[in-house]
Amino acid sequence: MHALASLRLRTVRPCLRLAVALAVGSTWVSAGAQPAEDKDQTGGTERTVTASPARPAEEEAAETKPPAAPALAESEATVAALFEDFLHYARLGRFQEARAFATSLLQRPDLDPVGLLVIADRDHKSLDTLITVINHSSIGAEAQRVLDVLREGESRRRQDPKRINGNITKLAGPPQAEYNAIENLIESGEYAVPWMVQALMDRSRQDLWPRILRALPQIGQPAVNPLAAALKAEDRDLRQNLIRLLGELGYPHAVPYLKQLLMAPELLKDTRTVVEEALTKIERRAGRRFLESTADQFIQLGEQYYEEQGSLRADPRRPTANVWYWHDGFIDAVIVPRELYGPIMAMRSAEEALRVEPARGEAIALWLAADIRREARLGLDVESGVVVENEADKTRPANFPRALYFSRAAGARYSLDVLDRAIRDKDTPVALGAIAALRAVAGETALVGLPGEGQQPLVRALQFPDTVVRIKAALVLAGACPKSQFVGSEWVMPVLAEALGQTGAQRFVVIDPDAANLNRITELLRADGAEVLGDADFYTAVERSRKDTRSVAGMFISCGLENPSVRRGVSELRREYRFQMTPIVLLRGPTDYETARDLAGQDLRIAHVTANAEGPELAEAMRNVMAQSGRRLPDPEQALGLALEAADVLLKVSLDGRTVLNVAAAEPAVL
């Protein structure tokens, strides 16, 4: 009886607020009949709400339209009450009511992300509920927005200086207080490090130093980069403490910074001993010796950042990342968009390598490639040298020269190295940036190599998966009118012929075993002016696409594939050079969210939407994944420009008379 009474009391409160909303004329409740369990509140009868196993089709349809927010009484409409009621109705499967409470919550002017996080912490299953609702209900968008607010609250709480410094002070307390303070500092992660280092510089807090030095290593890997930045501190005692901390942490990406200290001629003997002890600890934990030079270590570190794999990539759960600097006696963070973090840190590592060995070619090529990638992710045209204002990357000054300027200044050798890297990585923007530089500075020998040297990067670019890269490479090679035979010369004219056939119309492939949905999506894309090849069978669709010489702008693939599964199908596409870079939007059903999320998390060129997504959502998902992948397909104007440029180059080749290129191979396309 007690349990039943408790259930009824927990249920009555949100139902009363719902009744208040109805009483003041709210229009958000469905016009359909209420379930039998909903008793009329005006009669004074308490009601117990249960989930309805089935509802009329018109009520299901009504849920697809966001209702107006409930007009709750001011005394009832607290943030806590709205959040609790949203979860309550979501758990009952009453999604229409849950949407109304979520909408009202999100519109509250006093909605504080940190305050909402405190409220959510009272219900240890709140996050599980939100994730379930996001993945398996019609109110996933509203639940996602609520979860975004909670994540913002978590981020603000982690960064709060007052809270961090309070926890540093509590380290001096009894064991339980110290334990709680350490747990909170671990939660703050890298944001706690500057304040803990600041406390280590404050001699009035010297009694705290042993506890800070004991607590800091427990933060783990997030502490390494801010601590490494602080190695520039001039205070000898502080620097030795930081070195010891990096040794205790034991992460290899601190090694080049420690080795860099050993190169300083003014380094004191006792500090040198501390550095060597820290390196020994890291080597012991890593299970290997770090015998490479300091420059080699920085280049290896830069390559890891450039590849964006493993533990050094930016946290994929957060939209931003921190680049740490030592400035005016304090560790400062420059916040950058997450997608810029890898290129920026690769450039930084290359810069450190060049400080050690100024003429180190691998570091120069790495820096140039990372700079091109950084510009591409900023949305800039990597083939342009015009300086533009940009606010997203605060690690560079406002008038920082463009990547093309640096590539041209470095010379053909380094642009060829960058292009070689881009071909290996199937990276369209980096390839285009390198080709643009080569067009301005490279002669015939640099482009095609000496006889017997084998295939050069620009020639290999003629088989690049991206259409624009292939055409740009062919234009540069043919424009040079090479006089000596070179490996791959026979590929130039077919690519120029391909350029002549460009129209700019986007061509998509849709694969969905659900015939009705296949036809629906095909018609939506065609209505938007695209050319569409659609099929219910994966292998049939791929084979039809292979036989068509035109490029595929993107693919829409159902997660409901069975032969092969969508995981295997995507894997097979990525093994074929023609489809290695093709943007893919997965069409997920109610049970496919985790599969789609995992595939998208492993490949920047994959996004996902619900299988019943409408035209605007499909178009936006494809635009986003194309931008993320750096895919550049010519629009009608650009396609015409490429075709005319190809025609000019073909005329130049035909008039030259001495080049090894045979214009006859492109004659059918010219005609």
Image (tube, grey):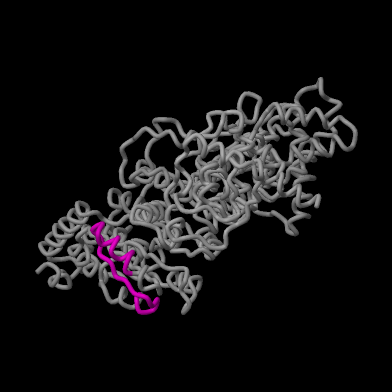
Q: Is residue 168 left or right of residue 154?
A: right
Q: Inspect this view and state whether residue 425 appears.
A: yes
Relative to residue 246, is residue 34 depicted above or below? below
- Point out the residue furthest to the top here: 204
Query: In front here: 569 or 350?
Result: 569
Query: In front here: 491 or 137?
Result: 137
Residue 67 at what x, y percent from top left?
Answer: 45, 44
Magenta region includes residue 520: yes
Give the residue drawn at x 69%, y 50%: 125
Magenta region includes residue 68: no
Residue 588 at what x, y percent from top left?
Answer: 47, 63
Residue 596 at what x, y percent from top left?
Answer: 51, 62
- Point out the residue furthest to the front here: 43
Give the residue drawn at x 29%, y 61%: 525
Relative to residue 115, is residue 465 depicted above or below? below
Can you tell which quarter of the image residue 546 is in? Answer: bottom left
Give the residue drawn at x 55%, y 37%: 105
Q: Is residue 237 left or right of residue 487?
A: right
Which region is colored magenta? 519-541
Q: Is residue 379 left or right of residue 92?
A: left
Query: In front here: 287 or 106?
Result: 106
Q: Inspect this view and state whether residue 357 appears.
A: no
Residue 614 at what x, y percent from top left?
Answer: 36, 57
